[in-house]
């Protein structure tokens, strides 16, 4: 399979992995042949990427979290947001979100524990309007993987997951027009946005009855270790350990995804940016645990190596975040019979470039899908 930007899709391509929306509903199933109507709809809904079948089904195993669990998590978060947005506070008890959140966080942990061979690679085939729901689930997963690496106890990791799922719930109290403003925010608008951690903390304690750790993770997720964050400008160990993790996961996921005001940033650059903040804005040990739990290069992405090879990332083994396994497809521009190469075992080889959007245009999509 290949990750292909939506603007380069053409009718006739076969979808490799289901496309879901922010409620966890399947919009297009795997195996579907794309039509121009579907492509236009995906563009309208502002999806950035799709997985396209290219004759090889070689990385589904690398998705640490199953499609089912991800869909369920999106569904719970989305329903809760909708009930709060529409001020159906009575529904929070009726639907028993408290239990639903606990269950889904436990399921997410079970999957992280189950897939020990691969580093966390986020299924980021998501649309722009549903950003908050996808982001919440990703932040929870990234936080939980980090805590697992850092040796947290399992019940703590579940609570951290809940805190991650809810970290931005206070955004339900911020007008949509401010949240989705493409341009620069005015100081007044900034003030309003900056209230979301506190408002979120209120919702989490008052309506969902979660304890202090879950609440602190939400309230403090925009604090920074050097005191430069908000709301309170806390620093160092005054910041709760959940917030120390959630802030890293939050920044990483926000930077790697498309936003109303910019395109996604190269995942390798984001990875290095986050590493560089360790010991400054971020807690150093947290950043170390984070950096060793996630895959730098997304599966399905095309990468170039220092010896001129081109390949498709098929998974990243634990212990080697920036040394994925790749399916080699070309050698200095000449197509080759595909074979697999583990960069964890080839120390002289390294990825020099990840091919995101513009370069794909240079490559014929038909060629991508037939030859390799
Ligand atoms: Fe936030």
Image (cartoon, helix red, strand yellow):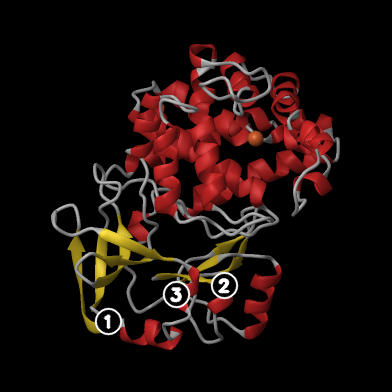
Q: Earlier in the sequence, mark 3 or mark 1?
A: 1
Percent of width and height locating residue 257: 56, 53
Percent of width and height locating residue 64: 38, 49
Above or below, 16 relative to 368: above
Percent of width and height locating residue 78: 69, 45
Percent of width and height locating residue 135: 59, 45
- 148 on left or right of 252: left
For label 2, the residue is 6
For label 1, the residue is 333
Looking at the picture, tell me which residue is in the foreground, 37 or 268. Answer: 268
Residue located at (50% from left, 47% from top): 69
Q: Earlier in the sequence, mark 2 or mark 3?
A: 2
Of the 4 image quadrants, the one containing the C terminus is bottom left
Q: Label 1, secondary structure: give it.
A: loop
- 304 on left or right of 145: left
Q: Residue 10, located in which quarter of the rendered image?
A: bottom right
Q: Earlier in the sequence, mark 2 or mark 1?
A: 2
């Amino acid at each position: 399979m290949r990750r292909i930007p939506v603007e380069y899709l053409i009718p006739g391509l076969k979808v490799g992995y289901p496309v879901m929306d922010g409620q966890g509903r399947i919009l297009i199933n795997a195996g579907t042949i794309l039509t121009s109507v579907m492509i236009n709809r995906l563009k309208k809904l502002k999806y950035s990427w799709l997985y396209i079948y290219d004759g090889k089904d070689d990385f589904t195993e690398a998705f640490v979290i199953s499609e089912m669990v991800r869909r369920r998590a999106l569904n719970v978060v989305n329903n809760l947001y909708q009930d709060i947005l529409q001020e159906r506070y009575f529904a929070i008890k009726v639907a028993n979100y408290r239990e639903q959140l606990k269950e889904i966080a436990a399921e997410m942990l079970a999957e992280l524990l189950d897939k020990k061979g691969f580093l966390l690679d986020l299924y980021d085939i998501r649309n722009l309007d549903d950003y908050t729901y996808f982001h919440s689930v990703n932040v929870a997963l990234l936080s939980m993987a980090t805590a697992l690496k850092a040796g947290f106890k399992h019940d703590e990791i579940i609570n951290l997951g809940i805190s991650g799922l809810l970290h931005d719930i206070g955004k339900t109290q911020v007008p949509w027009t401010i949240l989705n403003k493409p341009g620069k925010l005015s100081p007044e608008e900034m003030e309003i946005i900056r209230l979301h951690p506190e408002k979120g903390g209120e919702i989490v304690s008052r309506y969902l009855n979660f304890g202090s750790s879950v609440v602190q993770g939400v309230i403090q997720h925009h604090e920074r270790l050097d005191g430069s964050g908000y709301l309170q400008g806390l620093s160092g160990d005054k910041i709760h350990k959940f917030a120390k993790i959630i802030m890293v996961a939050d920044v990483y996921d926000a930077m790697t995804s498309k936003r109303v005001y910019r395109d996604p940033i190269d995942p390798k650059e984001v990875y290095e940016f986050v590493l560089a903040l360790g010991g400054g804005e971020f807690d150093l040990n947290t950043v170390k645990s984070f950096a060793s739990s996630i895959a730098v290069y997304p599966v399905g992405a095309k990468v170039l190596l220092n010896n001129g090879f081109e390949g498709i990332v098929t998974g990243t083994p634990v212990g080697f975040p920036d040394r994925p396994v790749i399916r080699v497809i070309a050698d200095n521009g000449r197509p080759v019979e595909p074979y697999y190469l583990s960069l964890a075992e080839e120390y002289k080889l390294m990825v020099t470039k990840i091919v995101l959007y513009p370069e794909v245009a240079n490559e014929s999509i038909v060629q991508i899908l037939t030859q390799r």
